[in-house]
Image (cartoon, rainbow, N blue to C red):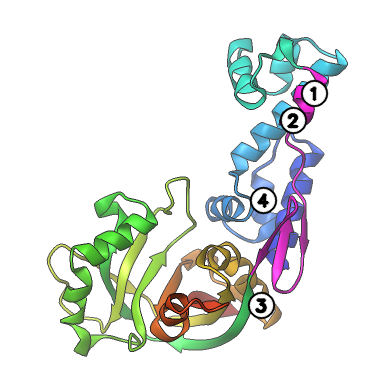
Amino acid sequence: MEILDKTQQVIDMLEADIMHPDYEKIAKITGIPLGLYQRIFTYICNISLAGYVRKRKLTLAAEMLLSKRKNVTETAMECGYESSSAFSRAFKEQFSVPPAMITGDIYQEKAFPPLSFKDNNTYYVMKGRRMMAELVKIEYMTAEDVLLIGISNQDFGVTTSDLWEVFWERGFDKKLHELHEYSVGMEDCIGLGYMTDFANDSGLGETYIIGKYFKTGTPVPEGMTGKIIKGGTIAKAQIGAKNLDDIISNAFILISDMVQKNGYTLDYEHFYWVEFYTVSRFCNPLENGAKQVILDFQMPCRKI
């Protein structure tokens, strides 16, 4: 898959000289702005780019110490630490012992090897874990400007699941229902989630909004956020899996790969993704214990 291939190229580039990572090359390899790709890397690999480099440096540092090629001070300098104390703190965080006490057994247990991927058309495997999902449908269309009205994590500062609880428990869904005559494409949708990047450690990206689409010019209820979503070419996709976690873990990978195969590319300069929670494809199957639930997505793209 395209994004996995690019990520493997990034990893291979970093591994070629892990002690001196050249982050500027990443945008050239991936064709994605570095800031956004760092989020994508975290989404795919379950570790940040900086965290990956740090763990790999410390793993090589442990190898140096075990081979007695260098002492602690020399190893700290080789890894780019300004002091032995800073190096020792980072080393102990990963290996649970100070550098001078590293053993072969501890190394085998705590070392962090290079990441590598195997992929198929509908799943990917990383470190022996197989994440299952299926691209059920994808199509491309030209969309008009719409107004997203909802509640934002920037206003409530909670996790994704907690923000959904706020949406229901405080009656924001009822406020939006009062505007149903102005809604756009929401006939089968209980709500949507809008992101401009990928989840960080708090469970949210920089911007996460839960709400619905309306015609531009619709009045925004008090206590809610309104955001114009610019029109243009969008990829509309449906991702199916046994559960929501598997869908979210695979959606970007599956969609970005198929978009590329269809002669498009995702518009990373104006990137967002929208999850549509439909009654017919997600809510009812989930409540009925179906073997597969389907989540709808939209992402901006352009013809290559």
Q: CA distance from mark 4 to mark 2?
A: 30 Å
Position in image of residue 270 (x %, y %): 47, 67
Q: CA distance from mark 1 to mark 3?
A: 44 Å
Name the one closer to the observer, 96 or 86: 96
- What residue do we see at 62% from left, 56% from top? 44
**Which stretch did the figure color magenta?**
103-132
For mark 2, what is the residue? 109
Q: Do tag 1 and tag 2 residues touch (Cβ < 8 Å)? A: yes
For mark 1, what is the residue? 105
- What residue do we see at 75% from left, 53% from top? 128
Q: Nearer the viewer, mark 1 or mark 4?
A: 1
Q: Give the residue type at disc 1.
A: Asp
Residue 231, picture quadrant? bottom left
Does dot 4 land on a helix, a strand or a loop?
helix
Does dot 1 land on a helix, a strand or a loop?
helix
- Residue 258's disc is 3
Residue 122 left/right relative to 50: right
Q: CA distance from mark 1 to mark 2?
A: 6 Å
| Of callouts 3 and 2, the N-terminal one | 2
Q: Give the residue type at disc 4.
A: Ile
Q: Is residue 107 magenta?
A: yes
| Of callouts 4 and 2, the N-terminal one | 4
Name the one closer to the observer, 269 or 220: 220
Residue 81 left/right relative to 223: right
Q: Nearer the viewer, mark 3 or mark 4?
A: 3
Q: Give the residue type at disc 3.
A: Met
